[in-house]
Amino acid sequence: MKRTLAFALVSAATLAVVPAFAEEATTTAAATTTAAAPAAAEGGGEFGNPGVISFNAATNLDLSSTSSKPPEGDSSSRTNLSLRPSIDYFVVEGVSIGGEVFLGYSSAKSAKATDPTKTTTIGIGPRVGYNLWLTPGKLSLWPQVSFGFLTSSSKTGDSDLGKSSATFMRLGLFVPLEVHLAKHFHLGIGPYVDMDLSSKVSVGGGDSKDSDKDTTFGLKAEIGGWIL
């Protein structure tokens, strides 16, 4: 009888403790998941969750138009414009793959030149990135590595002698700090580096020759949105 009573008491205690322990473990696991990334249940997903498609448009912070007037003679001028629309898909939590298009335009006219030299650049290439939350749902780092193939054409005046073309293979790194101002909307700004892996130039319709390989450092800003 005593053994039966003791067994009943132990069984009752076990049935009371186990559900409470299981509930605590479930709560702890949920809290850990939320800290790692914003919960998908909050509003139907968050930036960086698997399946998110992000649309972005970035530009180098060198959009400018400069005109210089010397004490004597004609003035010189230069205009730079660039834009990089892109699309990325998050294949697993935080990891994105995508591609971007590079569009660039510049116009330069020296003090003694009759006509300006106008250069148009276009390019395309893949990229990969990883979104790291600093403040879940508010602030994140999204470093991206890209590879691009670009071609540019320059023209000075109407003569073929003033025409040239160039092709580049370029490796890039962009580390933007993303500010998530509202659901499905973010702004980013951060340093970037572009390094030419190869560079070939053709002048006046002649054969392509190896040319200077540039490495560029700077700041870039972007605006973007995402869907799930």
Image (spheres, grey):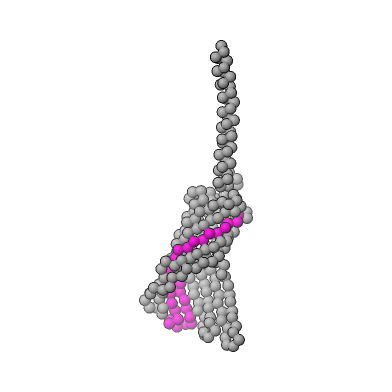
Residue 97, horizontal then vertical, whole percent: 47, 55
User: Compared with residue 43, is residue 150 higher up or lower down, i.e. above or below?
Assistant: below
Residue at the location (59% across, 59% down)? Answer: 187
Residue at the location (47% across, 59% down)? Answer: 145
Image: magenta residue range: 151-180
* Residue at far bottom of view: 72
Residue 63, horizontal then vertical, whole percent: 57, 70
User: Compared with residue 223, is residue 94 higher up or lower down, i.e. above or below?
Assistant: above
Magenta span contains residue 40: no
Residue at the location (46% across, 70% down)? Answer: 214
* Residue at far right of view: 181
Q: How many marks?
A: 0
Magenta span contains residue 171: yes
Q: Is residue 227 visible?
A: no
Residue 119, horizontal then vertical, whole percent: 49, 75
Q: Which of 158/120 is in front?
A: 120
Residue at the location (49% across, 55% down)? Answer: 129
Q: Is residue 168 left or right of residue 1?
A: left
* Residue at far top of view: 1
Q: Is residue 28 visible?
A: yes
What secondary structure characterizes most of the magenta part?
A: strand
| Residue 204 found in image quarter | bottom left
Split into 4 quadrants, where in the image is the N terminus?
A: top right
| Residue 60 found in image quarter | bottom right
Residue 177, horizontal then vertical, whole percent: 57, 58
User: Compared with residue 79, is residue 74 higher up or lower down, i.e. above or below?
Assistant: below
Q: Which of 134/56 is in front?
A: 134
